[in-house]
């Protein structure tokens, strides 16, 4: 066991946040702490790492174990480049490397017993250097930076010039390179795109230490966690398994708790009726029997009423009018910002009732497409047309559709003047704004609260075509599930951008991947997309071979699902692709063989350098040392090339 939390209690201004919270973390656990916003998850993490003191109880880290913590907002204050900032984590290896180089220089000028002592020291230093990853740490550092979404051309950027999200990624990179026995991460995926999140998942799955994660990313938790610690109404409950396992067990447990509570309430009511009846007889024996029953009733340990499932926010999405079957046509759409070319000649169409997700890395232009459709940006070229009777409702992740100078009440009443005061208050209450909250200024509330106001306006719009930009940002898991249910019950058409893979899996019937300036169509949910991504070569939806229809759209209609699913690159392109793949695999095989040979030679040199007849021979030692350096240089170069080839698709 690496961490033991026992009976932790914490209150702020007499409001209980945590009460008798107990759990333990084993050496290789990958545990997630879940709960609604405000449940106390971050508070618990801060108590574990010592930033906050518990009112009662304790969090004890095992002796000689190290801990690393990434909070939600990191402020890395440094004038170093990104690469050099991560390199500070490996300062011990850099110092060790310098000592090795100094020893090599000193060997040239000493002999006899001094040389022998120096050689012994040198052998120990090189062994220590190797066993601590001295020959691979720079490649490892490069791999972490690339995995977290920093392209090589940004390595030299000063940390001081980075955004808050980029600084958080730098802090995460430093933490991963430190390799503590226990990693604690608070919302680590907030500033990562999909490919970086997938890389982090793989990294943490293979991590030899323990991990504690607080995250609203359920797909991430499904892949990583083997233990879920739920904070609910100040109490902690531990569930074994991943998030999906927890969700099933939680629902079953809640159903059992509700049944036990209702049965007890029924029994209490029955006993109270019997007691009242006995007393009404007004006889000595019956009164004694009533008193006896009252004493027994008083001794019953009353069960607490279980918390209601997902009652914090209420969304009902109903279109006022039915649109035509054809909802949206986009043809030959292009957009650039100066020298930055986002996409060129893309096209697609939407049919009534489709739920389509646009995915892709940060900066590819997903939000730009939504803004162009909504008329907030002009395209460089191309055309956009909506079908008959289409009414758009737009959710903007930056909430530009809200007016910062207005109150929440004014924001609703000005856009929907036919609503009564009671209807406006009821609408806002459904999104957790009650009492005097409705008179707060939009400019004074948090990002999460603005998101709820935007969702309230979306619900009131009664639109039949919803365009959503990152709708799950700032929502806790329960609220995400409420939104998912609302969208799944929505009869209109939905087009959205999201990084939330679990959300996409539950709500999308089609996925458009924006990559390399073009769109690729996948008829299915996120898991289907991943499966096809792994199985087949990417099929360009802009290919003239696709069924473009009368409007030249780059996607077939839903009726052509089988035709689209079996679409392939041309025979010649496939052959060229296969040839490149074989060449890549052959090169990888050769590199791996060479790496093995070099590593064997490196080990042989180490053995030779400590042999009595060689360790006293300065010339031979220098020759071997020079060869060892050459071996290490070639190894590093080969490993970087191998890593690059492995990352290619």
Image (tube, rainbow, N blue to C red):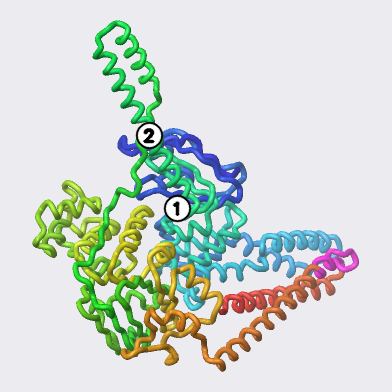
Q: Is residue 439 left or right of residue 514?
A: left
- Judge left or right: residue 424 versus residue 547: left
- Residue extending farthest to the front is 281
Q: Nearer the viewer, residue 431 or 181?
A: 431
Q: Nearer the viewer, residue 13 or 411?
A: 411
Across and down, in percent, residue 505 comes to 43, 65
Please provide percent x and percent y for residue 64.
62, 45
* On screen, residue 568 above or below 26: below
Rounded to the nearest angstrom, the CA distance separating label 1 from label 2 is: 31 Å
Part of the protein shown in magenta: 604-616
Where does the N terminus fall, quadrant-wise?
top right
Name the residue beneath numbered marker 1: 214
Looking at this view, is 523 or 177 the one in front?
A: 523
Q: Secondary structure at mark 2?
A: helix
| Quarter placement of the C terminus | bottom right
Q: Residues within 10 Å of mark 2 (few under 14, many from 20)?
A: some
User: Which residue corresponds to the image point at 54% horizontal and 60% vertical from the top-left?
Assistant: 176
């Amino acid at each position: 066991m690496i961490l033991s939390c026992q009976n932790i209690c914490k209150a702020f201004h007499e409001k209980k946040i945590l009460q008798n919270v107990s759990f333990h973390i084993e050496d290789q656990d990958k545990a997630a702490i879940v709960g609604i916003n405000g449940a106390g998850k971050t508070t618990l993490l801060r108590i574990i790492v010592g930033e906050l003191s518990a009112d009662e109880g304790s969090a004890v880290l095992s002796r000689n174990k190290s801990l690393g913590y990434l909070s939600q907002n990191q402020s890395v204050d440094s004038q170093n480049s990104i690469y050099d900032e991560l390199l500070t984590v490996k300062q011990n290896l850099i110092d060790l490397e310098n000592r090795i180089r100094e020893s090599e220089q000193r060997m040239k000028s000493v002999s006899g017993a001094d040389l022998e002592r120096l050689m012994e020291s040198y052998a120990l230093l090189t062994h220590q250097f190797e066993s601590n990853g001295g020959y691979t740490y720079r490649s490892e550092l490069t791999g972490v930076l690339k995995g977290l979404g920093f392209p090589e051309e940004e390595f030299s950027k000063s940390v001081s010039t980075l955004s808050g999200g980029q600084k958080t990624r730098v802090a995460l990179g430093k933490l991963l390179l430190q390799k503590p026995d226990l990693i604690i991460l608070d919302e680590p995926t907030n500033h990562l795109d999909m490919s970086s999140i997938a890389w982090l998942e793989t990294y943490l799955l293979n991590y030899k230490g323990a991990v504690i994660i607080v995250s609203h990313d359920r797909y991430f938790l499904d892949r990583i966690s083997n233990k879920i610690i739920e904070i609910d109404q100040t109490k902690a409950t531990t569930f074994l398994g991943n998030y999906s396992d927890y969700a099933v067990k939680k629902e079953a447990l809640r159903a059992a708790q509700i049944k036990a509570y209702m049965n007890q309430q029924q029994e209490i009511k029955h006993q109270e009726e019997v007691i009242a009846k006995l007393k009404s007889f007004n006889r000595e024996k019956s009164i004694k029997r009533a008193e006896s029953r009252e004493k027994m009733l008083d001794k019953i340990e009353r069960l607490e009423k279980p918390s209601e499932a997902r009652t914090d926010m209420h969304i009902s999405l109903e279109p006022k009018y039915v649109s035509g079957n054809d909802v949206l046509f986009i043809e030959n759409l292009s957009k650039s910002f100066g020298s930055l070319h986002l996409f060129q000649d893309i096209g697609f169409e939407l049919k009534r009732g489709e739920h389509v997700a646009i995915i892709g890395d940060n900066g590819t232009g997903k939000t730009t497409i939504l803004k162009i459709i909504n008329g907030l940006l002009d395209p460089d070229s191309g055309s956009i047309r909506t079908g008959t009777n289409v009414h758009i409702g737009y959710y903007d992740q930056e909430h530009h559709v809200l007016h910062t100078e207005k109150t929440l009440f004014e924001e609703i009443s000005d856009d929907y003047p036919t609503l009564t005061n009671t209807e406006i208050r009821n609408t806002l209450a459904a999104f957790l704004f009650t009492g005097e909250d409705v008179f707060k200024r939009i400019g004074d509330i948090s990002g999460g609260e603005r998101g709820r106001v935007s969702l309230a306006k979306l619900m009131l719009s009664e639109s039949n075509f919803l365009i959503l930009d990152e709708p799950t940002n700032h929502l806790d898991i329960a609220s995400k599930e409420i939104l998912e249910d609302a969208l799944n019950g929505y009869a209109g058409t939905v087009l959205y951008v999201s990084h939330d893979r679990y959300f996409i899996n539950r709500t999308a019937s089609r996925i458009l991947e924006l990559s390399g300036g073009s769109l690729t169509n996948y008829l299915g949910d996120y898991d289907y997309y991943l499966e096809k991504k792994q199985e087949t070569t990417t099929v360009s939806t802009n290919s003239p071979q696709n069924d473009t229809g009368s409007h030249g759209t780059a996607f077939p209609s839903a009726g052509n699902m089988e035709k689209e699913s079996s679409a392939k690159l041309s025979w010649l392109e496939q052959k060229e692709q296969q040839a490149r793949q074989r060449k890549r695999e052959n090169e990888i095989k050769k590199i791996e063989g060479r790496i093995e040979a070099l590593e064997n030679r490196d080990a042989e040199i180490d053995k030779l350098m400590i042999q009595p007849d060689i360790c006293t021979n300065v010339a031979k030692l220098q020759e071997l040392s020079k060869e060892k350096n050459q071996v290490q240089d070639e190894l590093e170069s080969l490993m970087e090339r191998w890593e690059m080839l492995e990352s290619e698709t």
